[in-house]
């Protein structure tokens, strides 16, 4: 299955283009989602979470390792924020919302 997962986001898509080239040089297929939206309408980019660097699910672990080795991300970048934890705890208690909100 070729499901894509997000390994990095940025409100500056040109940064992701550099990382895309780095990952592709390692043989990892990747795409940048919402790149044009982030370039043309920065205020909308913030609302949608910026541009997203996405890789195939089976390559995600290796892609993250490459990004960590290059100093582009740190392990802490993948930990949920305190707000995300509170939202998860709240939504997990409400059956209807539990189906919608998944970490």
Image (tube, rainbow, N blue to C red):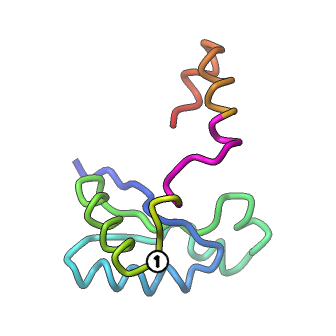
Q: Is residue 31 above or below residue 96?
A: below
Q: Nearer the viewer, residue 63 or 30?
A: 63
The residue shown at (63%, 36%) is: 85
Quarter holding residue 95: top right
Q: Residue at x 74, y 59 (%)?
A: 47
Q: Position of residue 29 (x, y in %)?
A: 27, 70
Task: Give the quadrant of residue 63.
Answer: bottom left
Q: Check residue 58 for magenta coloring.
A: no
**In the image, is residue 72 above or below residue 64?**
below
The quadrant holding residue 67 is bottom left
What residue is pinned by disc 1? Answer: 72
Q: Position of residue 56 (x, y in %)?
A: 29, 58
In the image, taking residue 85 as reference, residue 55 lies left or right, namely left
From the top left corner, tell me how far across and down residue 82 is, in percent: 68, 43
Residue shown at the point (47%, 70%) measured from the top left: 73
Q: Nearer the viewer, residue 25 or 31?
A: 25
Residue range (magenta):
77-85
Q: On the picture, is 98 further left or further right than 20?
A: right
Q: Tag 1's secondary structure?
A: loop
Please report the residue visible at 22 percent of the width from the left and 79 percent of the height from the top.
26
Q: Position of residue 48 (x, y in %)?
A: 67, 58
- Rendered view: 51 above or below 23: above
Disc count in the image?
1
Classified by dominant secondary structure, the portion drawn in magenta counts as: helix
């Amino acid at each position: 299955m070729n499901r894509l997962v997000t390994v990095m986001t940025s409100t500056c898509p040109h940064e992701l283009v550099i990382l895309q080239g780095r990952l592709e040089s390692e043989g990892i297929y990747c795409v940048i989602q919402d790149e044009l939206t982030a370039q043309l309408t920065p205020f909308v980019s913030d609302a949608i979470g910026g541009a997203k660097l996405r890789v195939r699910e089976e390559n995600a672990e290796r892609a993250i390792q490459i990004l960590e080795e290059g100093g582009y991300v740190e392990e802490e970048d993948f930990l949920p924020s305190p707000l995300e934890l509170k939202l998860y705890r709240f939504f997990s208690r409400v059956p209807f919302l539990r189906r919608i909100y998944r970490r």
